[in-house]
Amino acid sequence: MGRRRTNNRDSRRYTDWLNAAYDDLRAARALSKDDTLNNATAFHCQQCVEKALKGFILSRTGNGVDGHNLTWLCKRATSLDKRFSQWLDESAKLNKYYIETRYPTDIPTEIEDSYIPKVVSMTEDVFDYIVDRLGVRDQLDQWEAY
């Protein structure tokens, strides 16, 4: 079963998605400086990758996609550009930070301090690849916060 666009309010401009992803990346970088905010850092990393992948897919297909599963989004991006396959394993790891980091649970999600730089680095790698591939790097700092 394929995923179809069902939320007509989502932007149809891929640059809006990359702009929002860039905000999440900058938030993750700022939050990563405080080791008491590992969950918030990981959440913003997940959000950055999700929005960047959606922006890439939208730019290539003209169609928006719904869903939050980074592995599915990364597979979709891989069908458009084989180099995305390098992030399939990492996307699966980041998936768990979508829900688990946002809501309190009986067994809290604990992210080791040593893992945060890896999560941020992977997020930067995916984001950098997408903005370079789409040729929008020089526009990033001109965009208003989303």
Image (cartoon, grey):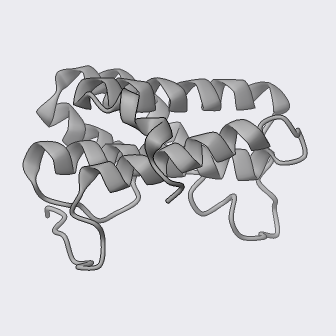
Rendered residue at 36%/53% (across/down):
17
The quadrant holding residue 85 is: top left
Question: Is residue 4 placed above or below 38 in the rendered structure?
Answer: below
Question: Is residue 11 placed above or below 81 in the rendered structure?
Answer: below
Rendered residue at 50%/53% (across/down):
144
Of the 4 image quadrants, the one containing the N terminus is bottom left
Could you tell whether 101 is left or right of 68 in the image?
right
Quick one: 35 or 96, which is closer to the camera?
A: 35
Q: Where residue 137 appears, x then y in whole percent?
A: 38, 28
Q: Where residue 15 appears, x then y in whole percent?
A: 31, 49
Could you tell whether 11 is left or right of 112 in the image?
left
Question: Which residue reaches farthest front?
Answer: 142
The quadrant holding residue 121 is: top right
Residue 14 appearing in the image:
yes
Quick one: 126 or 16, which is closer to the camera?
A: 16
Could you tell whether 32 is left or right of 137 in the image?
right
Question: Is residue 9 placed above or below 23 in the rendered structure?
Answer: below
